[in-house]
Amino acid sequence: MTGEAFMAALVDSIAPGGRVGHGLALPAASLVGCDRNLAKALADNRALQVLVDSIARQAGGTSAFTRSSAQERHALLEAVQSESPQAFTGLVALTLAHYYAQPQVLSALHWPARPPQPGGHELPAFDDSLLKPVLERGAIWRRC
Amino acid sequence: MAKQRPVDIVIVGTGMGGAAFAWQLSRLAPNLKILCLERGKWLKDRDMPAASAGWQSAAFGQWATSPNARLAAGGNPWSADYAIDDSESPLKPLMWNGVGGSSVNWAAHFPRLKPSDFLTRRLDGAGVDWPYSYNDLEPFYDLNDAMTGVCGLAGDPAYPPKPQRAMPPLPIGRAGELAAQAFNALGWHWWPVDAAINTGPYGGRQACNNCGPCLQGCMRGAKSSCDLTYLPAAMANGVEVRSGCIVLRVTIKNERVTGVTYADEDGSVHEQPASHVVVAANGIGTPRLLFASGLGRDPNSVLGRHLMMHPVAYARGLFDDDLDGPAGPVGAALYSHEFYETDLSRGFVRGFQIQVTRENSPLAQALRLSPAWGPLAQRDLAEEFRHSIVLMIVTEDLPDAENRVTVLDRMEPDGLPAVKMRYALSENTKAMIDWGYERTSEVLRAAGARREIRAPLPPMTGWHLLGTARMGDDPRSSFVDACGRCHEVSGLQIADGSIMPTVGAVNPGSTIGAMALKMASELAEELA
């Protein structure tokens, strides 16, 4: 019940990508392997498998889900989310954890496609001239 | 049960309270045999996620700040976590149960309390007064700063004078500069934070490189944590640290402490005789252990009561400009203490600070959105990521006896009773947050924000677990005296945030360390 096209359509409903504003264009989840990641996770996660089966069943089958429009899929998933909020949150978290770890996605967000270490980030040193008005006002702590 | 060789002092817990206490006592009373028992382990090879591809999701799994979340993810090998029933608390408890305590995964913001924080009853008719003053604690704040390694800038007009900080302040970033300019435009106080983070080499540790996710531990060692500061220094003085040892009870005979019973890593149970026991297991772990030891059974006992947590509320301003994103230590860049003191015309007593913090990872920000999925969620993330300033209203939490930690009638796998926290926001705190939100809106408007998003009471902010074994002169209204000595039995002392009678509106790490240094000095004098 978990064909490749269905899995791709499912994860693309969670992170569809495209032009998202601020001049950013994000890849769809299936383009960065979220569908394969989900398929792998199903093998060890009974609750997730039950949820995904339920999505397919409510859509009238995996092919019906895949053929339906993005709006129809979104509406169906909203209904599933209402019925099974905890399991659905797990599906979203699993998909997004994989999605936002992908170098293509981080680059598309204009963020370094690498872990924070060992490189870290450059920030300019603190400019204490900003504090001039604070200092001019004098002490404000409460004497007691 | 194996009987260990007696020691003079057993310290339970190696976080800021226990570690500072151990070091101070070991240098002032070098002849004492001091043993620290720690339920978790030493971090091996700074094995933290910041250099791995999974660094973002680690914050929701094995490296979550919540022990309950870590347990749900299968546990973290270094933190010996126990489940905490937080079903009756909107704020979830956060901590680290390994060597170094919660200094391992704290944000390392290192402010002091102010003189007025010690006198809230006398000055404002709220809370209770401390049995000592800011001036009494001040030399220990200074010593704690030196041992911990603090960056910042002396001269904050919202505080009595402090010594020159050991290192210059953290960079505040473009977001911090915008916020600072907004505070200036409003004529309000602000100052760069004191942080226990190296901005240059200090204490044999290197400088921070602004990587961001401090709450998953600092693999670089630039963020100060007790496993890198107090504990090595204490061990050089002869203190023994036994990790992987869960203290099951403090043993008491004829109202006098005789030592502790603990289980080691293999589950073997040991009797550890000691003349004196110091408990520093945080505002949940300390009452849990003491209840398990038969203390606090009197219905009028304050043990476990008056839990204070500094409820927070976030206001996020969205900007067209490119800002910093999750670069720089996540905890704080600068703060405003403009509204720290009581002004009853605001509709509440005492006050709050506004901290300007940093953005989180893309995943953390995406999962926080509502909805978190679908095209709107991705549009919202694009609008926010690298385009936001985060203001945090940190409120003073006044003691309420109904906010409490209790133990339940069942045992946990670690051999201690199950523990539950009950916590509700006071009307005073709610009024403070509502009023504070009007102020953060002013800041964000002055900074030029396009839009503001509010996140009242995010649950994963229960870092500060305070007040549950409070200090005072009267045994009817306090659990320990001004030196942290238990009123009920002799030879038992508490050296963590549990003993704070009130908590101000600032992060408590600096005060916990200073209190522990003070208490250890007093004990050394007493034993001399």
Image: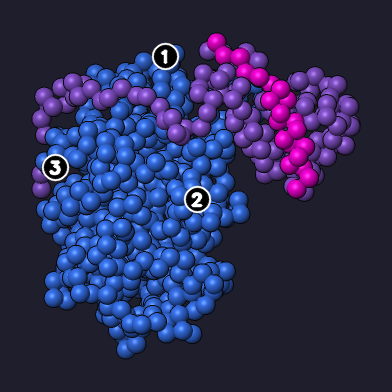
Chain colours: A purple, B blue
Identify which residue is drawn at 27% across, 75% down: B33
**Residue at label 3?**
B162
Q: Quadrant of residue A105?
A: top right
Q: Position of residue B508 (x, y in %)?
A: 30, 50
Label 1, on which residue?
B321
Task: Give the magenta range.
Answer: A23-44
Chain under callout 2: B
Q: Is residue B521 above or below residue A75?
A: below
Labelled disc at residue B97? none
Left or right position of B221 against A127: right
The residue located at (50%, 23%) in the rendering is A112
Q: Are marks 1 and 3 on the same chain?
A: yes
Q: Provide the residue designation for mark 2.
A: B66
Residue B143 percent coordinates (x, y): 18, 52
Q: Amino acid at mark 3?
A: Lys
Instruction: Characterize the local packing of mark 3: few (<14), some (14-19) or many (20 or more) Cα atoms within 10 angstroms.
Output: some
The relative height of residue A118 versus residue B217 in the rendered view (above or below) is above
Q: CA distance from mark 1 to mark 3?
A: 36 Å
Q: Looking at this view, is B67 or B101 the one in front?
A: B101
Q: Circles 3 and 2: CB distance less than 8 Å?
A: no
Pointer 2 or 1: first along the chain: 2
Q: Is residue A29 highlighted in magenta?
A: yes
